[in-house]
Amino acid sequence: MSALLPTYARSELAFARGEGAYLFTASGDRYLDFASGVAVTALGHAHPHLVKTLNDQAKKLWHVSNLHVIPEQERLAERLCDATFAERVFFANSGAEAVECSIKAARRYHYKNGASERYRLITFEGAFHGRTLATIAAGGQQKHLEGFGPPVDGFDRVAGFDIEVVKAAIGETTAGVLIEPIMGEGGMREVSGRFLQDLRALCDREGILLILDEVQTGIGRTGRLYAHEWAGIAPDIMATAKGLGGGFPIGACLTTEAVGSAMTAGSHGSTFGGNPLAMAVGNAVLDVVLEDGFLENVAQMGLRLKQRLAALKDEHADVIEEVRGQGLMLGLKSKVPNTKLLEALRAGNLLTVQAGDNVVRLLPPLIVGEAEIDLACETIDAACVVLKRDAVATT
């Protein structure tokens, strides 16, 4: 019996090493990794620049805590601000922590501006924002809330992406709106650019904050550094993580100056957040992602993958119902149980990720090439053939 808490439905696979877009078991079996540790290993496995940076930093300094200045932390914050809307950054260790900080920052902003009654956030049905008590309350999914007592107060969920419904939900206690540009766990459901633009305008009119959860969509995943850039808008607060560390645990809450200035000394903190190891790796990730042409290539590879998947949908319409997502954050809504599709792909040595609404997520590393995309699509094609054959055999 394992000594671990039984909180994960794990596969039987264990990997010994990785290289680029591939993972290898101890016996040498090779798997094409279109899961990327759930959109985390943005630059693939054992990326030379990340490996060298981590090794060099490990020989110098691991941890000093935020009682002292951490130069690499200052540098990463400045680079994130230069590349985004942000003027202030707080570093944590995970996406959930980044969202927690975002929630606190929204409440603190209104408190500092004499409106402490404004603490509630409007969220969206089907959302996923993390596993802490506050973030499961924000998501509001019963399967995540069950057994953990009364949900944390302060969240008002609305259904769908209807600006009139959001407007009707705003009250005197509303602090802001929290939304993912693409709902990853929620079934790869895209939020339209027009809706994000309408949300931005509505928040401005009502004096409330727009908060984006870009934990999964950020760091180039959709072909822009952050997905909201496609809509031509800027949030007041944004949570980012996953790809920012390329596999090393990093989370960050980015804010405007108006919001960030409300988070004064002692209002928030993290012992490990922003440590020298994490910051060195985060800067190394940006070295690569911000190179000329990198994000353009991500967009091109994403288009190639989506076009290939669309052709597979047409060919296997009795297995694949819909192709969703953008860039290298794509999903197949399945007509068979998504667990069966995921298992068939794994049997073909292709790793993917389950999602809500009977979707299988495809999240290849951002360094993926045409050859890997073609191999993945060949594997999906073969899996669909097997699933159709099995369906006929059981009828």
Image (tube, rainbow, N blue to C red):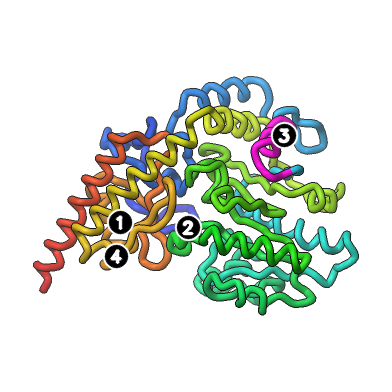
Q: Secondary structure at mark 1?
A: helix
Mark 4 or mark 3, earlier in chain: 3
Amino acid at dot 1: Leu
| Magenta span includes 77 | yes
Q: Which residue is mark 2?
A: 184
Q: Secondary structure at mark 3?
A: helix
Residue 78 is labelled as: 3
Residue at horizontal 12%, vertical 71%? 394
Q: Position of residue 215 (x, y in %)?
A: 57, 51
Helix, strand or loop for the magenta stretch, by majority:
helix
Mark 1 or mark 3, earlier in chain: 3
Mark 4 or mark 1, earlier in chain: 4
Mark 2 or mark 1, earlier in chain: 2
- Horizontal side, residue 197 vs residue 295: left or right: right
Badge 4 crowding class, 10 Å Cα cut-off, few under 14, some 14 to 19, many 20 or more, is some
Label 4 to label 2: alpha-carbon separation = 17 Å
- Judge whether residue 167 can be spotted in this image: yes
Amino acid at dot 3: Glu
- Judge whether residue 97 can be spotted in this image: no
Residue 83 is labelled as: none
| Image quadrant where residue 164 sits | bottom right
Q: Which residue is mark 4?
A: 321
Asked whether 204 or 148 is in front, the reply is: 204
Label 3 to label 2: alpha-carbon separation = 28 Å
Q: Which residue is mark 1?
A: 342
> Which is more foreground, mark 4 or mark 2?
4
- Horizontal side, residue 15 vs residue 241: left or right: left
Label 1 to label 3: alpha-carbon separation = 40 Å
The residue furthest bottom is 168
Amino acid at dot 2: Gly
Q: Please state, as top left, top right, bottom left or bottom right, where the C terminus lies in the image.
A: bottom left
Asked whether 222 or 353 is in front, the reply is: 222
